[in-house]
Image (cartoon, rainbow, N blue to C red):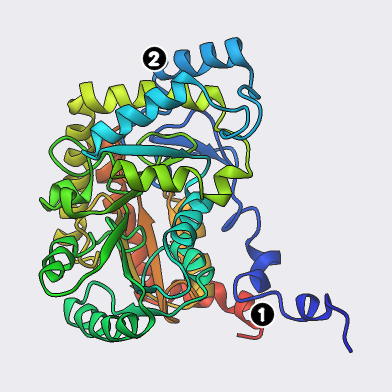
């Protein structure tokens, strides 16, 4: 018999093994200063492309005033207790009503955090005889929610309607045997690639198969659609989404999330979401802050317009310079390059130290070996000067990657890690 911790000490995982080289710089970095298009990293001014503040709300004076006033009035604890016991207020109900109206649903329910809330929604919606069919590229919170399911589940190839149909045929046959139902899960926007989910194609399959559709629209809420109601509105199928999930952590620059659906479904979820039944209510500072942020989503369309002006300028500029940004159809802007993990480290250090550009880096195991993904998140606070400076920087690092500069610089790191 071995000690439980032996495995942990011997194998720190595909990312953990880089901790001594990466921590504090490549992972767990510390950005300082007011949340904005330009912040400080290790004392240097950098253009920040890794802040999920799509509409630039985080540091607006009117937002900070509401947050501050709520904190002064209520502190960080109120209301104390779970919603079902002692943590329920008129403001929570007001926010739920306004969120439901904004995303064109009958009812909604607040969640403390998107990750745990989304897991719990999946767990509550399905029983052992039900079958889940989900996009293989779904976010980790969905993957973990699906893992809670004791029944059968199938994945379909990313945004592939033929694969989905094939798996719906399998699921339908199995559900007929078990007497269960089928839940299909996709994302409104896939946060790594920036692609919208094939919601129109999924909805079209409702004519042939009997299933319910759950959509996680974390990156679409507030950024897509005529009113900002998300990817379903953008694609004209919001009414066909049976359960709609979104977080406050992206376009609303805050903490919390919500689920929206028909009243009867929300009523059921309110009494069966374990992550909410047994957890503290969302504090008032976040509830009142979300009410203000939602009001700005409704009344300040120029913020979304500015966001998309920046998105189009950045993405068009990258394409014109020959960069591979995949098939993004959202604000999320991935830049794909070829190289090893040590090369990626050298490249990002050069980008931050010498070009003053801070963006997220994604490597194996999140994406295949040999690929480097630099993920840029444009916001309404960025300027065209920021974008031009970034385009020039990316041209510079691509040249150094291709001529072997980063390979030479990373040789020592690779040797130390036995790569």
Query: At 17% from the left edge and 39% from the top edge, which residue is drawn?
Result: 309
**Under tag 2, what secondary structure?**
helix
Q: Whole-percent x and y of residue 22?
A: 63, 62
Q: Of callouts 2 and 1, which one flags the residue occurring earlier in the amino acid sequence? A: 2
Instruction: Confirm or deny contact between disc 2 and disc 1 (CB under 8 A).
Output: no
In the figure, 136 relative to 173: above or below? Answer: above
Give whichever of 271, 153 is nearer the camera: 271
In the figure, 36 relative to 212: above or below? Answer: above
Residue 336 found in image quarter:
bottom left
**Under tag 1, what secondary structure?**
helix
Residue linked to disc 2: 62
Residue linked to disc 1: 417
In the figure, 150 relative to 376: above or below? Answer: below
Q: Where, quadrant-wise, is the C terminus in this rendering?
A: bottom right
Q: Where, quadrant-wise, is the N terminus in this rendering?
A: bottom right
- Furthest toward the bottom, the residue is 1
Relative horizontal placement of residue 401, taking residue 43 as reference (left or right): left
- Disc 1: CA contacts within 10 A as few (<14), some (14-19) or many (>=20): few
Q: Whole-percent x and y of residue 192?
A: 36, 62
Relative horizontal placement of residue 115, taking residue 377 as reference (left or right): right
Query: At 23% from the left edge and 78% from the top edge, which residue is drawn?
Result: 164
Query: At 22% from the left edge and 59% from the top edge, which residue is drawn?
Result: 196
- Disc 2: CA contacts within 10 A as few (<14), some (14-19) or many (>=20): some
């Amino acid at each position: 018999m071995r000690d439980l911790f032996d495995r942990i000490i011997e194998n720190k995982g595909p990312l953990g093994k880089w901790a001594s080289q990466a921590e504090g710089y490549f992972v767990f970095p510390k950005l300082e200063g007011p949340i904005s298009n330009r912040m400080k990293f290790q004392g240097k001014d950098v253009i920040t492309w890794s802040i999920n503040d799509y509409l630039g709300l985080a540091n607006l004076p009117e937002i900070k005033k509401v947050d501050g006033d709520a904190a002064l009035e209520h502190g960080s604890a109120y209301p104390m207790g779970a919603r079902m016991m002692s943590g329920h207020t008129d403001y929570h109900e007001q926010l739920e009503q306004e969120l439901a109206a904004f995303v064109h649903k009958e009812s909604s329910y607040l969640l403390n955090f998107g990750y745990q809330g989304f897991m719990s929604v999946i767990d509550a919606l399905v029983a052992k005889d039900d079958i889940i069919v989900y996009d293989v590229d779904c976010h980790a919170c969905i993957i973990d929610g699906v893992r809670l399911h004791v029944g059968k589940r199938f994945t379909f190839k990313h945004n592939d309607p033929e694969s989905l149909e094939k798996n719906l045929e399998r699921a339908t046959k199995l559900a007929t045997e078990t007497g269960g139902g089928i839940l299909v899960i996709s994302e409104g926007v896939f946060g790594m690639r920036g692609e919208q989910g094939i919601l129109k194609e999924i909805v079209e399959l409702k004519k042939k198969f009997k299933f319910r559709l759950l959509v996680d629209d974390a990156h679409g809420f507030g950024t897509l659609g005529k009113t900002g109601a998300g990817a379903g509105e953008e694609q004209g199928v919001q009414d066909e989404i049976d359960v709609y999930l979104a977080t406050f952590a992206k376009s609303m620059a805050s903490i919390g999330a919500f689920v929206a659906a028909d009243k009867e479904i929300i009523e059921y979820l309110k009494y069966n979401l374990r992550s909410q039944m047994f957890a503290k209510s969302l504090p008032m500072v976040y509830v009142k802050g979300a009410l203000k942020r939602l009001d700005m989503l409704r009344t300040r369309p120029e913020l979304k317009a500015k966001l998309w002006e920046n998105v189009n300028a950045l993405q068009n500029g990258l394409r014109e310079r020959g960069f591979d940004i995949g098939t993004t159809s959202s604000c999320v802007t991935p830049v794909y390059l070829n190289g090893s993990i040590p090369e990626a480290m050298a490249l990002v250090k050069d980008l931050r130290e010498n070009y003053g550009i801070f963006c997220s880096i994604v490597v194996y195991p999140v994406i295949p070996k040999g690929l480097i993904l630099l993920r840029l998140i444009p916001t309404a606070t960025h300027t065209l000067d920021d974008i031009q400076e970034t385009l020039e920087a990316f041209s510079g690092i691509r040249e150094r990657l291709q001529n072997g500069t980063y390979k030479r610089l990373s040789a020592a790191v690779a040797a130390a890690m036995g790569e």
